[in-house]
């Protein structure tokens, strides 16, 4: 996992990458609050802290979503009165062709909404919960590990996987 040293609030975030090719891990490009977006009071419905999944390949769940699918999500807490429930919105589940070849995934974060793009085409918009976050957050590129890895991975001491990143572009809006 790589998270950038600089934190951002609003702007344009884009990655061009190839997702990993197995059913153990999943590739992701996301923005995470510096504080806890899952804390009911800290997040305040996503205004103070939010997690924005620009894309997740979810290859570990490919039987459910298909191995050429990606999803975009927003996660926070404090939107309703249920303190121990994460408030989430799946902005979309998208078939992008071959996720193991280069594709671009992007987010335009404005004062009013989050706008998601896949391969240069708008995929969805959202101002879920109480609206867009007002605080700087960190940008993360990761190859996530699920709670349980398949035996084909855990029993193979020479197992390797990769997410190939061609570039990341970030344009800050003041």
Image (cartoon, helix red, strand yellow):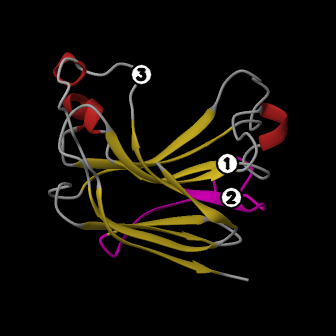
Query: Pointer 1: what residue?
Result: 50
Label 3, label 2: how far apart the Cα atoms are: 25 Å
Q: Quadrant of residue 131?
A: bottom right
Label 2, label 1: how far apart the Cα atoms are: 8 Å
Q: Disc 3, disc 2: CB below 8 Å?
A: no
Q: Which residue of the protein is positioned furthest toward the right in this rendering?
A: 41
Query: Pointer 2: what residue?
Result: 137
Q: Is residue 127 on the magenta stretch?
A: yes
Query: Magenta residues?
Result: 119-139
Asked whether, in this view, residue 33 is left or right of residue 54, the answer is right
Query: Pointer 3: what residue?
Result: 147
Give the residue at x 26% y 66%: 103
Label 1, label 3: how far apart the Cα atoms are: 22 Å
Q: Point out the tag, 2 or 1, that comes first from the N-terminus.
A: 1
Residue 138, position in %: x, y? Answer: 63, 58
Q: Nearer the viewer, residue 92 or 49?
A: 49
**Crowding at mark 2 (Cα within 10 Å: few <14, some 14-19, many 20+):** many
Which structural element holds mark 3?
loop
**Crowding at mark 1 (Cα within 10 Å: few <14, some 14-19, many 20+):** many
Give the residue at x 40% y 50%: 28
Give the residue at x 79% y 27%: 81
Q: Disc 2, disc 1: CB below 8 Å?
A: yes
Which quadrant holds the C terminus? Answer: bottom right
Q: Nearer the viewer, residue 106 or 153?
A: 153
Which structural element holds mark 2?
strand
Front: mark 2 or 1: 2
Give the residue at x 75% y 50%: 130
């Amino acid at each position: 996992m790589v998270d950038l040293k600089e934190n951002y609030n609003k702007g344009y975030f884009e990655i061009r990458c190839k997702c990993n090719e197995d059913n153990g891990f999943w590739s992701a490009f996301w923005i995470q609050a510096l504080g806890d977006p899952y804390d009911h009071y800290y997040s305040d419905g996503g205004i103070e802290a939010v997690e924005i999944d620009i894309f997740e390949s979810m290859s570990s769940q490919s039987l459910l979503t298909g191995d050429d699918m990606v999803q975009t999500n927003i996660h926070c807490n404090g939107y309703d009165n249920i303190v121990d429930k994460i408030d989430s919105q799946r902005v979309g589940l998208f078939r992008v062709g071959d996720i193991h070849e280069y594709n671009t995934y992007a987010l335009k974060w404005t004062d009013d909404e989050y706008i998601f793009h896949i391969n240069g085409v708008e995929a969805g918009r959202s101002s879920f919960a109480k609206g867009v976050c007002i605080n700087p957050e960190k940008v993360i590129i990761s190859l996530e590990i699920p709670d349980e890895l398949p035996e084909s991975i855990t029993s193979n001491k020479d197992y390797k996987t990769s997410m190939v990143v061609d570039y990341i572009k970030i344009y800050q809006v003041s």
